[in-house]
Image: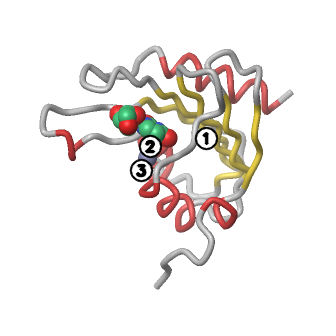
Amino acid sequence: MEEKRLIKKAQKAMEKAYAPYSGFRVGACVLTSDGVEFTGCNIENASYGLTVCAERVAIFKAYSEGKRNIDALAVVADIDEPVSPCGACRQVMLELLPNALIILSNRDGSKIMRTRPEELLPYGFKL
Ligand SMILES: O=c1ccn([C@H]2C[C@H](O)[C@@H](CO)O2)c(=O)[nH]1
Ligand SMILES: [Zn+2]
């Protein structure tokens, strides 16, 4: 099943998280309409505000390779409950993958929430 594979890839990407400050490890995987997948992990910095979330790394990898049609995004964190994406990522999702299925899960993939960018960020800012 596609959803399970995306979660597995996000879990694998989570192992690469660079999170020495928060210790909060996150992984993500996007699926493009032509079946290509891009993974990401969170990458922190001593200048804390420069940190980039796992979701945005995966989304930006897809866009930077010319893949703008994203059908699904899976995000997992090393916690018991499904991860809740930050406000910045919600804003990015709304603009870059407005119609994608957003799959949120926990460390072992045992709990899954399914949502959409519009539901994660109602009345979001758009130009
Ligand atoms: O959905 C989320 C939530 C948090 N983080 C990262 C940012 C930071 O490195 C750490 C703690 O906020 O987790 C993500 O990558 N994705
Ligand atoms: Zn974020």
Quadrant hosting residue 28: top right
Say which residue appears at 13% left-offset and 39% top-offset.
Answer: 47
Q: Please tell me which of labels 1 and 2 falls first in the chain.
A: 1
Q: Looking at the image, what colour scheme do you see?
A: secondary structure
The answer to whether the residue labelled 1 contacts the one labelled 2, judged by CB atoms less than 8 Å apart, is yes
At which x and y percent is residue 14? Answer: 49, 21
Task: Return the mark for residue 96.
Answer: none
Residue 75 location in percent, x, y?
59, 35
Q: Residue furthest bottom?
A: 127
Rendered residue at 71%/40% (across/down): 35
Asked whether disc 2 touches disc 3, contact meaning CB atoms under 8 Å apart, the reply is yes
Asked if the beta carbon under badge 2 is closer than 8 A to the nearest atom of ligand 1, the reply is no
* Label 1 SS: strand
User: The residue under label 1 is which amino acid type?
Assistant: Val
Is residue 54 something that shows in the picture? no
Query: Does 14 appear above or below 95?
Result: above
SS of the residue under disc 2: helix
Q: Residues within 10 Å of mark 1 (few under 14, many from 20)?
A: many
**Residue 126 location (% of width, % of height):** 50, 80
Residue 99 in the figure: left or right of residue 88: right
Q: Which residue is mark 2?
A: 61
Picture disc at residue 30: 1
Q: Secondary structure at mark 3?
A: helix
**Residue labelled with disc 3:** 64
- Gap in angstroms between the C-alphas marked 2 and 3: 5 Å
Mark 1 to mark 2 CA distance (whole Å): 9 Å
- Give the vertical position of 82 relative to 21 (above or below): below
Alpha carbons under labels 3 and 1: distance apart: 13 Å
Residue reaching furthest left?
47
